[in-house]
Amino acid sequence: MNAPNASGWKPGTPEAAQGVSGVETVTGNRGLMLEEPLIFEIGGADTCGVDLPTPPPLQGRGPGGGGGADIPHPNPSPEGEGLLGRLGGLLRTDPIGLPGLSEPETVRHYTRLSRQNYAIDCGIFPLGSCTMKHNPRLNEKVARLPGFADLHPLQPEATVQGALAVIDQLAHWLITLTGMDAVAMSPKAGAHGELCGILCIRAALEARGDMREVVLVPESAHGTNPATAAFAGYRVENIPATPEGRVDLAALTARLGPDVAAVMITNPNTCGLFEREMKAISDAVHAAGALVYCDGANFNAIVGRVRPGDLGIDAMHINLHKTFSTPHGGGGPGSGPVVLSEALAPFAPLPFVRKIGDAFELIEEGDGSEAAPDSFGRMTAFHGQMGMFTRALAYILSHGADGLRQVSGDAVLNANYMLRSLEDVLDAPFAASGPCMHEALFSDRHFAEGISTLDVAKALIDEGFHPMTMYFPLVVHGAMLVEPTECESKASLDQFIAALRSIAERARSGDQSLHQAPQLAPRRRLDETLAARKPVLAYEDPSSRT
Amino acid sequence: MRYLPLTDADRSAMLDVIGAESIDALFADVPEAARLSSPIEGLPMHAGEMAVERHMARLAAQNLSAGEAPFFLGAGAYRHHIPASVDHLIQRGEFLTAYTPYQPEIAQGTLQMLFEFQTQVARLFGCAVANASMYDGSTACWEAIAMAGRVTRRSKALLSSGLHPHYASTARTMARFTGDAIVHSPPRLEPETDFAALAQAIDGETGCVVVQYPDILGRIGDMTALAEACHAAGALLVAVVTEPVSLGALRSPGEMGADIVVGEGQAIGVGLQFGGPYLGLFAVRDPKHVRQMPGRLCGETVDAEGKRGFVLTLSTREQHIRREKATSNICTNSGLCALAFSIHMTLLGEKGLRALAAENHRLACLAADRLATVPGVTVLNHSFFNEFTIVLERDARQVVRELADRGVLAGVSLGRLYPDGDRRENGLVVAVTETVTAEDIETYASALEECLR
Amino acid sequence: MPRYFTEEHEWIEVDGDTATIGITDYAQEQLGDIVFVEVPAAGTALAKGKEAAVVESVKAASDVFAPVSGTVIEGNAALEDDPALVNTAPEAGGWFFRLTIADPGELEGLMDQAKYKDFVAGL
């Protein structure tokens, strides 16, 4: 088998634990820590939190009834003795099983659930590679203006000129900030953007009759990179890293050849380092007839200071939910526009916005034959994540040229402060080679036997923090990747550093009580093994459980 | 700058700890030639809330929003009333500003919500298991085709002519690169779906058949026989639902034998937003297919004290573990939209969803009958839920523009959806939800009459 | 019956022209709790070094390669219901599959128990 578990992440069944408070309550609640049942346990089929007009209920015979009221009727009367629908004989008669709650119960259910979550609004959220920065509330406000929020994507273009202007303005700033030639706005998230970029590359190669089969990806890459290349029909090969955590230019150059379509590189990379030889890498890739894809997940480190276009990159996605602070929402939605070089711009997907004189128009299928003859086509319904575009544009305009440069500066300053404040207690594998970019990488090397990165992360929870990214990148055993972002004050950093120092010292001394962490969260460690061995993925009524 | 907490004194104290002279010195690894020495071209300095809000509000004012006019657009995006509490709750910072729940002990709020959401979607679709969401309906549709290929090891997909053309187009784009074969043609202006013809077209290479329910023209077809034909030939039936409110009135695809049911969840809880972010729904009828599903799954388990809790599970399907062998490259999905959907669905409950569906259908019947009285207008459908197609005697795209000038947003023309012509351009897809009033219908009918005169 | 080991942490027990294959105690220890095993179907022709099975823990999925070429006789059906057998009895009841060996010469160069022990100690 291939290397069993190179990352070192080895969760097992959690050790059984007693309640720690020592106080048992009737409700299971502990002060402000409130338990909340599932809606299926508290809601009812006849409860409704919305007052709706009460038309006569749909009537008709259910499946197989035949000849009933719900067959096509030439002149049905919608009013009167019950509604005679035109539902094709397919009226749903069996219970669906959707519980309802009144409005106060609904508000309370979700409010109580929300309090079991950690969030940026609660404190530092130093997940490396995720850029969890403050989400300005002005951006929420402008995204909800009815002129943006209450627009249908297929309204006549004359009625949506302001919306098209938002797309055009954001596109302009993304192109300007990256020094590229064009941008595809429709990708829905980072991985979708990667797909867009790789499809542009493939379309460009095919247009010159060049059927290449391989995409090279560094071992330290995000999992989305190899998955995207495979999803687009490529074979994936790894390229090794140097001992100091950067792409091995010599190994990469040696592997380049007529079968290599593209190289996917993250810069700054997932070890938190800038790829110093990026331009040389790009030149070598181009000389071999291939193209350079850059994973832009870490753009926050260089925004306003480095233009990827100056480094020879052909395509790069920008996670608007990272660098430009659109809220992550517990797992999305994201938005992943892709900036493109001159070589790839003609192959960008449909639809896109074009300005003719003072008016904006949307180029869609059918317009494409003249306006975009080489486009690789559509990759989603409609035009992209408009709700994220308004937020990102407001973010860019709020920060301005000076603010954006300060964003990357402070993000890098905060990460280096973290690195230097902790490198005496935590192993920092690449710290000797110089400053890091916007994230600081540590390993589990100094922990005593039996203590893992997972234990340290869970202990941070008891201290009131969200842990850093664990076990990524895969090239470092027991990796801990800390990305504080520019939104943390020095006091906030100092508090986090003090907590992590203390936990690191316990880990070095072999404090076995770390296995019990977290002890103070709404839940103790969860049994992920049980969840995977016997998956329960939907609620079953107790009566129907076997 | 209001979003940056560090003071200059902080910065210099921190630089002392680091041992660097300046922030610029921290960028030592960036070659000189790659550093931007000048400010970003054309971008003004930072701006206060008032100035930014003014700029954005001016742009918003250049649009005609749906609430400002009688509004009849659908075709994959629907305007429904969203209760005020939905938007309030999704703006709670603990939901809005949380990340993917990778640390379950401090993310039970998001995880329990996802478990509830998965169950609601599965039940609505008549399926066993739903995932924690995809980007939108169109990408979920392609993922379903790709999944059917993995299950059947066949690479041909037959797409109903009634499938949303953007969904078909998305699938064609992907198939061009993966080597899958997509069979699809635009719909004919007929009152019935093409399900019977699809059943005839299944052969030994067909991995899946994809139908939309109700379809792009609003027609409703029984997919029971088609499902049987698929299964007899070793293929899967994929059903696409772009208007989930319809399932408060219509039998579920799962009940009729669809193997994978995907959809666009925007209609419940998520606003129109000019096309995004939306909410991809993805469910399977047979639990044995779970390991081939794309996207995140939330499952129930217990914690170390034996208390019920929830975690993301079966993650070895996903890109962060399986890398190039993952079932999909998807990472970020539509978590907050899933929350909005789930809250709205909880407010409705079964009673409310059925009442909402009935009201939509009632108003749609009213509108269809009224528009049918306008000279030069024919209603195509025998069956429909809240959306139907009318056929005019001239290009509907132009009529839509003229009606917009008269302050009526009249629907989605088939000329916009199918720019190739072929006599479909006179078709107009009209959606009628509970947000439409009887006066709106009358205004529309009168304006259309004047326009066609 | 002779038992051989690979550097990829598989064991092969040979009985005439039949081999039983699984992963070693060291491998299961590295993986942690096993939650799913995908074994090859009977009749599958496997080439030496090619992917034959997949073993999953909660946070890792590893391919198991065929240590020798051959045709699969059976996969271990017990692992479907009880993947934990790989943790509790990796070199006994937690076996993955049996195959008919195509070329006994391929067994040459594999490690015996003592050599594998030294190999693991050096990791």
Image: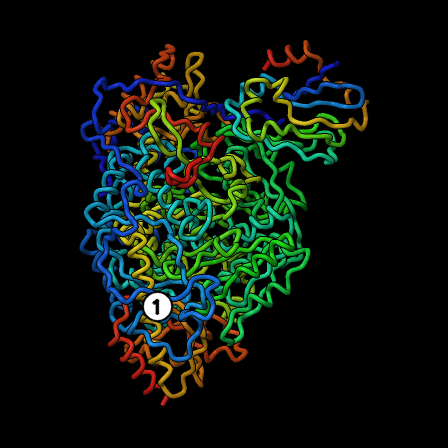
Residue A316 visible? The answer is no
Amino acid bearing label 1: His
Occupied quadrant, residue B243: bottom left
Give the answer, above or below, for where B303 lies relative to B251: above
Q: Quadrant of the C terminus of chain A?
A: top left
Provide residue B205's location: percent of width, then percent of height: 67, 55
How many numbered marks have been drawn onto this rendered protein structure? 1
Residue, x 29% and y 74% (percent of image)? A79
Provide residue A151's location: percent of width, then percent of height: 32, 64
Give the answer, above or below, for where A442 lies relative to B404: above
Give the answer, above or below, for where A493 lies relative to A300: above
Most foreground residue, B270 or B4: B270
Provide residue B359's location: percent of width, then percent of height: 30, 66
Most foreground residue, A67 or A245: A67
Residue, x 27% and y 61% (percent of image)? B81
Residue position marked by numbered label 1 in the rendering: B361
Residue C43 visible? The answer is yes
Occupied quadrant, residue B24: top left
Query: Could you say whether the residue bearing mark 1 is in a helix, strand or loop?
Result: helix
Q: Mark 1, chain letter? A: B
Residue at the limit of the structure toward the bottom, as seen here: B453
Provide residue A131's location: percent of width, then percent of height: 35, 39
